[in-house]
Image (cartoon, rainbow, N blue to C red):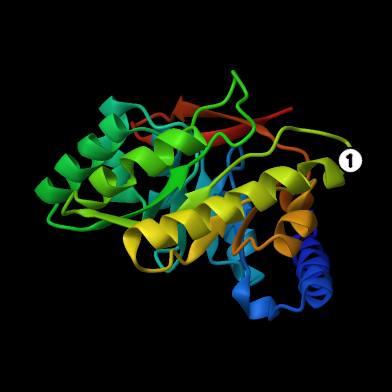
Amino acid sequence: MDFAANLSAIQQRIAAACARAGRDPASVTLLAVSKGQPPEAVRAAAEAGQTLFGENKVQEGKIKISLCPGRLHWHFIGHLQSNKCRDAVRCFSMIESVDSLALTEEINKWAGQSAKSMPVLLEVNVAGEATKFGFTPDRLLAELEQINAFPKIEIHGLMTIAPWSPEPERARAVFRRLRELKESCDEILGAPLLQLSMGMSGDFEVAIEEGATLVRVGTALFGARQKVKRAEEEGGGDTFVAEG
């Protein structure tokens, strides 16, 4: 896998999408989705210059982070269960998938116990898909001030996952709606939210055209995802092995 070549190709596509939208390419940050990738792949990506990575599972991320260079930054991007909040707060620099008031309260509790403030993005289920988590747009606006009142929570922006389609253009309305929601949130809070995390390997260019500041790309960078599992080595300790 030539990660450097893949990274260069993605950066060129980001730059082209920014040019179409009249944006500075520096306004878009690439998050490499390392779910299912072994630490060796992350280290190779880091050597190519990538520094921001995203994990979907707390336990996998917790182990992987400990095996990778300390200079890297990690976001949690999967569905977060309440009983995993303590580790998520301790391991990740941002939680992008805060999807309820109750979860926000739990994150705030553990952030307080860790003596830190926790940057978060609020996940919005813009398309109303039954299989996805997230605030409905109406609930987001209704509960935003309560969320903002938690002393250890820093709301940096919004996140969404568009319905999958082989046609990226079909995601445009979802991305546009999230941008409009951000503008409504800005009015409620009296200050602008800085981040819109939207767009993945199949549709990130459309997301950039609609205002994305974070794009979450996995397959286009790493290739097909490897199945990763924990294994106990002789003598103890966790490692990762790739299968298939």
For the point 58% across and 54% down, which residue is it? 180
Q: Residue 190: x percent and y percent? A: 34, 66
Q: Name the image quarter holding residue 127.
A: top right
Q: Residue 69: x percent and y percent? A: 45, 63
Q: Name the image quarter holding residue 107.
A: top left
Q: Is residue 157 above or below residue 125?
A: below
Count every numbered label the image shows and give the total.
1
* Disc 1 target residue: 167
Between 172 and 52, the residue placed more toward the observer is: 172
Query: Which residue is at the far right?
Result: 167
Is residue 67 in sight in this rendering?
Answer: no
For the point 24% across and 44% down, which residue is it? 146
Q: Residue 16: x percent and y percent? A: 84, 72
Q: Residue 9: x percent and y percent? A: 83, 66
Is residue 30 in sight in this rendering?
Answer: yes
Is 222 on the left-hand or right-hand side of 134?
right
For the point 49% across and 32% down, which residue is it? 136
For the point 39% across and 64% down, which residue is it? 70
The crowding category of the residue bearing disc 1, from other C-alpha atoms within 10 Å (few below 14, some 14 to 19, many at least 20), is few
Query: Which residue is at the far top?
Result: 130
Q: Is residue 79 above or below residue 25?
A: above
Is 19 on the left-hand or right-hand side of 27?
right
Mark 1 secondary-structure assignment: loop
Q: Is residue 200 above or below residue 163?
A: below
Is 29 on the left-hand or right-hand side of 24?
left
Q: Quadrant of the C terminus?
A: top right
Between 35 and 160, the residue placed more toward the observer is: 160
Q: What amino acid is at disc 1?
A: Glu
